[in-house]
Amino acid sequence: MRYHTFLIKYGEIGIKGKNRYLFEDALVRQVRFALKDVEGEFEVHKSQARIYVDCGEDYDYEDVIGNLKRVFGIVGICPVVRMEDRGFEQLKKDVVAYMDEAYPDKHLTFKVESRRARKSYPKNSMEINCDLGEAILDAFPETRVDVHHPDVMLNVEIRNEIYVYSQIIPGAGGMPVGTNGKAMLLLSGGIDSPVAGYMISKRGVGIEATYFHAPPYTSERAKQKVVDLARIVSRYAGPIRLHVVNFTDIQLYIYDQCPHDELTIIMRRYMMRIAEYFAKKDGCLGLITGESIGQVASQTMQSLAATNDVCTVPVYRPVIGYDKQEIVNIAEKIGTYETSIQPYEDCCTIFVAKHPVTKPSVEVIRRSEEKLKEKIDELFDRAVDTAEIIEVK
Ligand code: ATP
Ligand code: MG
């Protein structure tokens, strides 16, 4: 079947009044972004509280559906056949032909649901429903009408042309990115943080990211892996501004000055501080991490409290209550898993203590950090000033 248009359905809860325009405009923008690399011509427009994607002659159906399924805010995607209005008798024939092609097995129940956007049409909705239903029953005696729970809901919209559709392909749900501000994701090369970014952006939040590496202890490949992960997340979240921070000197300095069992916590506090610095600079309203309670020593409740202690913006931890396997399931679904498990050293895994503290006291950690007084400001400034910025699209 050749489809000429895709009707985009979106949830309408909470988008009354002025919010509706923001929501729809953001959705149109995200749909355009999602289709920009798909071959073919697409025109995305809104009309009467609906969004349509009109397609040119040649396009790849699977690519379009695959990309639209990643756009947050879309509840369902309906492939539409557009028919010229050549009178009701012709419409009956066209609708019968549609049913014949779309449903090779005719043992099904159906209901016709028509809508008139063009009120001057010579029949009202009731009449259209009955007459088209009858035409289908006549053509395919195996079919039956079921107005309560039909297998096939055949939608017929009378516009300038006539739109016929019966399939709803489930969308990603959530809110269009850009309707809920921006947040800064601490993106490592692991499994959890890309999932965390995905989950927050699903609620309409645009994403920036910060990655800490420690050359020459971590490799160029490790950095490339993070850029690759950012690219996969950006297929859902839209363009991501990735800050790559050289963390080596700060890590070495902490290693020299502080107790080794506190190294990870102190290091993570500096990650938060630097990420927050970029967040504030770029108008991000919070930080996002892939932390999950108890996953490792640095994610016990005490460790999380000690890390959180330095943050002055909200920290969102969407996978906080998830088991690893639950996070892995999402990573597989969104396509980050295979990249995340590539075995490159992360800066968190170098210089780690054999027995890190699992119940750090905030007071003790603050006192240990005083040993960094002499040089840390200078190192901090250098780390943020020399950060490389990569626009990931
Ligand atoms: P991930 O959590 O992404 O799977 P991980 O489990 O190795 O990686 P942890 O050491 O558990 O990461 O760190 C917890 C969180 O801290 C990460 O989810 C991420 O948000 C942040 N983080 C850790 N290392 C880095 C890094 N090198 N750059 C940026 N953020 C990081
Ligand atoms: Mg983790």
Image: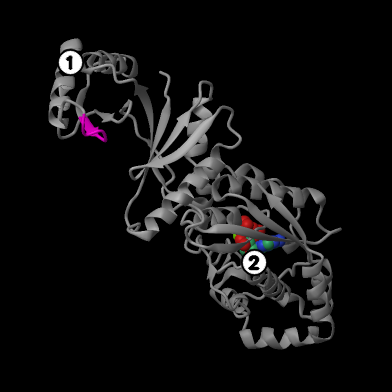
Question: Considering depth in this image, is 107 or 10 the residue closer to the camera?
Answer: 10
Q: Is residue 126 magenta?
A: no
Report which residue position mark 1 lands on: 135
Question: Considering depth in this image, is 110 or 271 the residue closer to the camera?
Answer: 110
Q: Which mark is residue 122?
A: none
Q: Quadrant of residue 278?
A: bottom right
Q: Quadrant of residue 51?
A: top left
Report which residue position mark 2 lands on: 282
Quadrant location, the N terminus: top left
Label pair 1/2, CB-CB below 8 angstroms: no
For badge 2, the amino acid type reads: Asp
Q: Is residue 196 above or below residue 79?
A: below
Question: Considering depth in this image, is 370 or 73 the residue closer to the camera?
Answer: 73
Q: Ligand 1 sits in which quadrant?
A: bottom right
Tell me residue 391's x, y (percent).
70, 52
Which numbered disc, 1 or 2, marks the residue that appears first in the sequence? 1
Q: Residue at x 59, y 78 (%)?
A: 312
Q: Is residue 115 magenta?
A: yes
Q: Residue at x 57, y 78 (%)?
A: 305
For residue 35, side relative to residue 210 (left or right)? left
Q: Residue at x 28, y 30 (%)?
A: 157
For residue 18, side relative to residue 196 (left or right)? left
For residue 107, side relative to residue 56 (left or right)? left
Tell me the colour scheme of the image. Answer: one colour
Q: How many marks?
A: 2
User: Within 10 Å of the Cα at label 1, are there few (<14), some (14-19), or many (20+) other Cα atoms?
Assistant: some
Query: Which contiguous range is marked in magenta?
Result: 113-120
Element at label 1 = helix
For residue 40, side relative to residue 156 (left or right)? right
